[in-house]
Image (spheres, helix red, strand yellow):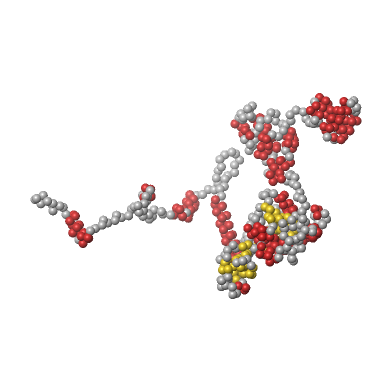
Amino acid sequence: MRAPAVRRLLALRAERRLSREHVRLAGECLGVSERTVWRWLAEASRSPQAALRPGERSGDRFAITREIRVLLAYWHGNASAVHRQLVARAQTGGDDGQPTTTAESAASPAGAPPVAVPLLDPVPSLSTFLRAVRRDLTAGERAGLAAGPGAARAHDVFGKRAASWRNHVWEADHVQAPLLVDADGDLVRPWVTWFIDTATKVITGTAITPGVPSRASVLAALRAAVLREEPYGPAGGTPEQVRVDRGKDFLSTAVTTAFGTMGVAVKDLPAYSPHLKGTVENLNRAVDRMLFAALPGYTLTPTKHRSGRRSKGAGHKPETSGAMSFQDFTAEVLAWTRWWNTEHRPKALSGRTPLEAWQADPTPVTDIPATDLWTFTLEDDGRPRKLTSHGVRWRGRTYIAPWMTGQAGRTVTVRYMPHHDHEIDICDARGSYLGPAHLADAATPEQLKALRTARAERARRLRAEVKAAETLRRQRFAPATTAGPARRLGALTSAQAGDELAAAEHTDASKLALPDLIPPAAPPTGWRTPASLAALTTPDPPAPAPSSRYESSAPDDTAGRAAAPSTTDEDGDTS
């Protein structure tokens, strides 16, 4: 508005109708003083270019260049450190922009190389430099230089998707509860897997897993989301599309096959793009602040838990007196989900609850029978098997069921829920469901408990051994208060060093090997053997010369004749 106001005042001056009241009113409207408006008029009278942008400073002002942007990225957004290095560069740099002293590299400790620092003349003051940074860099650019692209996205502006209808698009995700629960004597951090309808904000399906979730968690939540029978529903049905991130559980073969069989398109979103599935991300934040924060054992920042760590020896269970049980935690999550659907009134729904908005939508709902849905969400073994008199053999185990009586020899296929090895489902060669089968000779609960204890003890012993090995491997150095070479600590006697070296040589299989103890035999004569290899072989003893029939009948006589000297008779004949 400055330029049009100044042009109008100049026009009034040309018509000789400009008054002080005009200038005062213009200053009040523009938020500046009357004296400033008079100065703008004077500058516009001297230069027509000043009337285009009134109030801009005349002359060149300091601006942030590309080289300074690189320095800001080097210092992670620390503008004061960049200014100190610019001052040090101006004090030690030559006219050609190159360092003139060898001490220039030490002018700013741990700074960028001097050749990467521009030589400014003059160097602006710190306040001018900081003002230029705030003026020439946006808030997103400053955050990105300080903390990376993720921090810059917090200052971006994102569009809002157009309103849709129920079951048009669902979003799915995992969220970890930052607290510990008691799951059969072990302290674990539970995960919640759920689906939410983007149009009505209703949570259609929820599954809680004690520990790290898997594709079984996704399939269980999907069954709860699609079914509208008790204890699920009334919201549900089959969606048209599901948005997921690049989690391997959501993109596993079993999950994508289940979606494809139901005719649901899976939208795989790009990595590090939580804003593209903002509905479920907002749900994750809401459950953390509205539910998890009120539960016992809540921690703002989850810490890595070493599940199964024994407190003071084998057989001692971890302390679980102050932790919620997994059953209680599951009940709390399901109760909060019902509250969200039936009582919570998001602002986007204009005072309605998510369930009311879902029920008010006239869009038809596509349902799938429970038996078909169970089949869709099972993973296929992928190969035919024979039903023998002992049952069905799968993964080295035998599964039996009462309905198998009289059906030995039949070709069947196996479908199963991931990680549920205690039970599988059997179908015929055409895919028709026959019935479930249970593991034969399943271990008793006492055996499983003893096995878990033995495994935990073995893991504890291995951790102790690894820790002891790391202690031996750790190198300690003396602290330094002046510049100098590093000095190792940890003195040993010559006897201690010799004993440890001897123990290492005794356990090193390569040093205990004796490759020359029995030299290899010589290769056949027809082989082309390298000279280096031929020198390491033992030559075979020479083979005896073939003998004639007469020589073999009188060996002693032959040897005697060979040893006797030859004689010559008087006629000169040799005898």
Give residue 244's quadrant in the image. bottom right
Give residue 343's quadrant in the image. bottom right
Identify which residue is drawn at 64% across, 37% down: 111
Q: Is residue 216 at least partly visible in the picture? A: yes
Residue farthest to the bottom, as pictured: 406
Front-most of 551 and 103?
A: 551
Residue 228 drawn at (x, y percent): 74, 64
Location of residue 414 with respect to 264 vertically, above or below: below
Give residue 137's quadrant in the image. top right
Front-most of 505 and 406?
A: 406
Residue farthest to the top, as pictured: 46
Identify which residue is drawn at 74% across, 46% down: 158
| Apparent side of residue 126 relative to residue 103 in the rendered image (left or right) | right
Residue 175 drawn at (x, y percent): 70, 56
Identify which residue is drawn at 59% across, 42% down: 480
Q: Is residue 84 at least partly visible in the picture? A: no
Which image quarter is the N terminus in? Answer: top right
Residue farthest to the front, as pictured: 430
Identify which residue is drawn at 69% across, 58% down: 263
Residue 46 drawn at (x, y percent): 81, 24
Residue 209 drawn at (x, y percent): 68, 61
Front-most of 45 and 338?
A: 45
| Apparent side of residue 256 relative to residue 541 in the rendered image (left or right) | right
Count of numbered tags: 0
Location of residue 269 with respect to 22 vertically, above or below: below
